[in-house]
Amino acid sequence: MYVERTLSIIKPDGVEKNVIGEVIKRFETNGIKIAAMKMIHLSKSQAQGFYAVHKERPFFDSLTDFMTSGPIVVMVLEGEDVIAKNRKLMGATNFKEAEEGTIRKAYATDIEKNVVHGSDAPETAAFEIGYFFNALELHAR
Ligand code: RTP
Ligand code: MG
């Protein structure tokens, strides 16, 4: 079995809407394990570093403001094919296009305030996990 890891974030709107447990429950009921987890409040420069791939996009400033607007929950998820599996559970970036039964369909209210983040490929997962967690904070499940 090929076990992968991915970075998941419950964004400030998800924390504010009190759905931390609902999001985690969806991971656990779908066989995904949590290998690391913490709650943090990003500074503007930390958010800019995390979203550096989007720095030329028109929404970069607004996105990094939003991501610093309150605490977030960062998690490392572990499981078979977990990068794609998590993206499927999240649903489309724009909640209006998200499939029924997805996290964003259930809780997102805005294209930006879309509750969760998930790494989109093995390379981005490696960068994003390393951005928030060191080796001692990662627990093989
Ligand atoms: P994420 O990176 O947060 O998991 O989301 P994603 O892959 O589905 O979407 P991505 O294209 O990577 O965009 C990152 C986040 O930027 C915000 N966004 N705003 N105003 C806009 O048009 C717009 N487009 C994207 C969203 O918060 C999106 O999740
Ligand atoms: Mg993305």
Image (cartoon, rainbow, N blue to C red):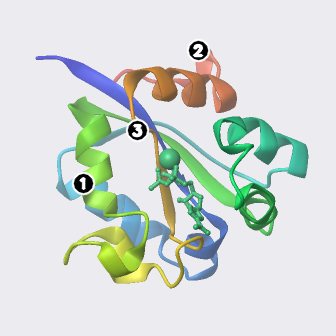
Judged from this view, the residue extending furthest toward the left is 1
Compared across the picture, whether 45 is left or right of 32 comes to right
Residue matched to label 2? 135
Compared across the picture, whether 128 is left or right of 97 comes to right
Q: What x and y, as percent, mark residue 37? A: 55, 42
Q: Amino acid at mark 2?
A: Ala
Q: Nearer the viewer, residue 40 or 52?
A: 52
Of the image marks 2 and 3, the number of the one nearer the N terminus: 3
Q: Nearer the viewer, residue 130 or 52?
A: 52
User: Mark 1 packing: few (<14 Cα in 10 Å), some, or many (20+)?
Assistant: some
Q: Secondary structure at mark 1?
A: helix
Compared across the picture, whether 81 is left or right of 116 comes to left
Report, in whole angstroms, how far the alpha carbon at label 1 lies from the one at label 3: 11 Å
Q: Which image quadrant: the N terminus? A: top left
Q: Amino acid at mark 1?
A: Lys
Residue matched to label 3? 120
Of the image marks 2 and 1, the number of the one nearer the N terminus: 1
Quarter of the view holding residue 137:
top right
Quarter of the view holding residue 97:
bottom left
The residue under the point 45% across, 24% down is: 139
Q: Amino acid at mark 3?
A: Asp
Q: What x and y, as percent, mark residue 3? A: 23, 21
Q: What x and y, as percent, mark residue 45? A: 89, 43
Mark 2 touching mark 3, by CB under 8 A?
A: no
Mark 1 touching mark 3, by CB under 8 A?
A: no
Q: Which image quadrant: the C terminus? A: top left
Confirm if mark 3 falls within 8 A of ligand 2.
yes
Residue matched to label 1? 88
* Pair 2/1: label in front: 1
The residue under the point 72% across, 36% down is: 52
